[in-house]
Image (spheres, grey):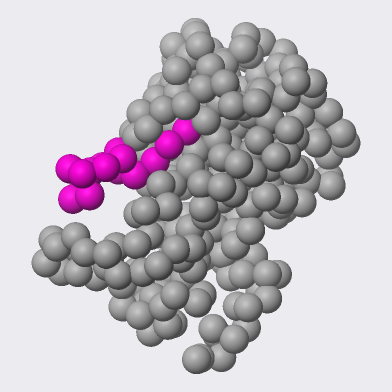
Amino acid sequence: MSKLDTDLKNTENIRAYNRAAWDRQVENGNEWTVPSSDQVIEDARRGVWDVLLTDSKSVPRDWFPELDGLDVLCLASGGGQQGPVLAAAGARVTVFDNSPRQLENDRIAAQRHNLDLTTVEGDMRDLSAFQDERFDLIFHPVSNIFVPDIRPVWNEAFRVLKHGGTMLAGIVNPVMYTFDEKLINDQGIIQVKYSLPYSDVTSITEEERIDIYGPDDPLEFSHTLDDQLGGQIDAGFLIAGFYEDYRKDDPVRKYMPSYMATKAAKP
């Protein structure tokens, strides 16, 4: 076991590692760090907009309440994509994210387009920056794979959401983490290799991580459906909507969806 592997046993070290990793993703032009275009923002002002919780399937518009004047938390959703669109559509948006560079993209978009959008840096499992029942809507795209434990995410989201509010969340199908990613990349062969729950810290070595994903990728962690779906229910949410989505340019899409999304209500 390398020193890095040992250091990453500490949750705070994982947070710092992934903060720096996502800052590098901004520098490298990762597709999820590229802000929405000026045209997309102007279209949203006219009521023509859509956003993603997962890879490619737009969130149904009937999952959203009327956005005008709504207090929205974009949870672990920095990058200048969803937040500015929702703000341009009329919401009062707070973007909360672990990466300063991702949040910078949202601030730039807000200034350029005079949007009602603020940014807060922090860990998605700790929303102590916000009082109870602060938001009407929480928008949480696929991102909880970057923390090793997610039940605190649901508990905190429930706390800061108003009664009658809605949380929209994107989830990775945990089965995606069982496959030998190197074998898929090198030979296009889909083969189960890892047991669940999977962790970039404990399931593979540092050398394997770098070989498969490169030195700049953030650490990922699979989560059980018991924690993803059951965790929302245990936190107090009622699941009111669900759909699945497929990852673009992935051989696995021939066999199963890679993502799912939930609409949850706080009674």
- Farthest residue to the right: give it: 131
Residue at screen point 88% across, 36% down: 131
Q: Is residue 51 left or right of residue 10?
A: left
Of 168 and 254, the residue lying toward us: 254
**For residue 227, above or below residue 257:** below
Residue at screen point 44% across, 47% down: 172
Q: Is residue 225 left or right of residue 236?
A: left
Is residue 234 at all visible to an observer of this figure? Answer: yes
**For residue 84, above or below residue 142:** above
- Would you say residue 5 sits in the magenta stretch? no
Residue 242 x, y percent position in the rendering? 47, 26
**For residue 265, above or below residue 69:** below
Residue 188 x, y percent position in the rendering? 13, 61
Residue 78 x, y percent position in the rendering? 57, 43
Residue at screen point 55% across, 35% down: 169
The quadrant in which the C terminus is found is top right
Is residue 75 at all visible to an observer of this figure? Answer: no
Q: Quadrant of residue 13?
A: bottom right
Residue 232 x, y percent position in the rendering? 64, 38
Task: Please state the extent of the stretch shown in magenta in the rendering.
Answer: 246-261
- Would you say residue 249 sits in the magenta stretch? yes
Q: Is residue 22 left or right of residue 173?
A: right
Q: Quadrant of residue 57?
A: top left
